[in-house]
Image: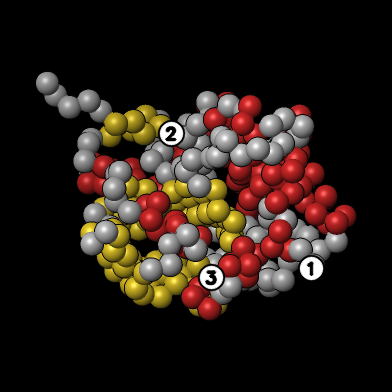
Amino acid sequence: MSACSGLAPEAGGIKIDGLSVELGGKSILSEVSFEIEPGSFLYVIGRNGAGKSTLCKCVAGVIRGYRGELFIGGRQASSLSARDRSRAVAYVPQSSPGDVPYIVSDFMEMSRYPWRGMASEADDRRAVSEAMELTDITFLAGRRLSSLSGGERQKVMIASAIAQETRTILMDEPTTYLDYAHQVETVDVMARVNRERGVTIMVVTHDVNLAMALSGKVVALAGGRVLWTGLPSGLLEPGRLEGIFGVPFRHYGSESGGGQILAPQRSRL
């Protein structure tokens, strides 16, 4: 992690207390409360419409019209300027832009804007280069973003978030457009960034196997409320996933070992 970061090493946590959001007169989140310890993983799971992406956007600052308390790195989020928040939190949205008229290297350099005036050009180049190497996209540097596949654009977005050098990274469905090989690569990258740089990572996902692949904490949302919180191993408890997703799941593998896979089952016809 670059010395240019203005946040203390312990300033990567998130605390949410009684967060509620209404959009278009409809309640999307209601009294959501949980905490992410600095340097940890947290997975937010749930069905479509559970409020997962809305929660992610609140933390990222995309949605500001909420009730309740939200703290980022120990600071009240509402007190942070847009630039302060960008130095604290990087956000990888669910969909990546396909019509941006920039080549990848130029797009990556934009992620360094929050540090302008605080970091040298050498720091910026190093941060971008390291992030591209870590995510294995250096060969895309001269390509136009609009010419990339969905999976390649998603990797660029993840690399940009890493280059931003924040203490917290938010990822909304980060593996949606990736094939299995690139999903594994992305999981490895996330683990390395967390382990080597102490970055707090919050992942919104439908993929319960992603939560099982890495240590961390799980928050399950249903109807905009917290339905369950616990360790990934708790997802193996009978009926747990059916209660969250509304369909039964089958567990393949040993509960005490690796190689575990959770798969939804077809309803009886």
What residue would you read off at disc 1? 118
- Label whose residue precedes the other's in the sequence (3 or 2): 3
Q: Position of residue 268 (x, y in %)?
A: 14, 24
Q: Three-letter amino acid code at disc 3? A: Ile
- Figure check: 85 above or below 177: below
Q: CA distance from mark 2 to mark 1?
A: 45 Å
Mark carried by residue 260: 2
Q: Position of residue 101 (x, y in %)?
A: 65, 37
Foreground: disc 2 or disc 1: 1
Left or right: 159, with 245 as reference point: right
Q: Three-letter amino acid code at disc 1? A: Met
Q: Residue at x 62, y 63 (%)?
A: 86
What residue would you read off at disc 3? 72
- Figure check: 185 above or below 117: above
Foreground: disc 1 or disc 3: 1
Is any part of residue 114 visible from this angle?
A: yes
Q: CA distance from mark 3 to mark 2?
A: 33 Å
- Label whose residue precedes the other's in the sequence (1 or 3): 3
Foreground: disc 3 or disc 2: 3
Helix, strand, or loop for circle 1?
A: loop
Q: Residue at x 81, y 63 (%)?
A: 119
Pointers 1 and 3 in contact (CB under 8 A)?
Answer: no
- Figure check: 243 above or below 118: above
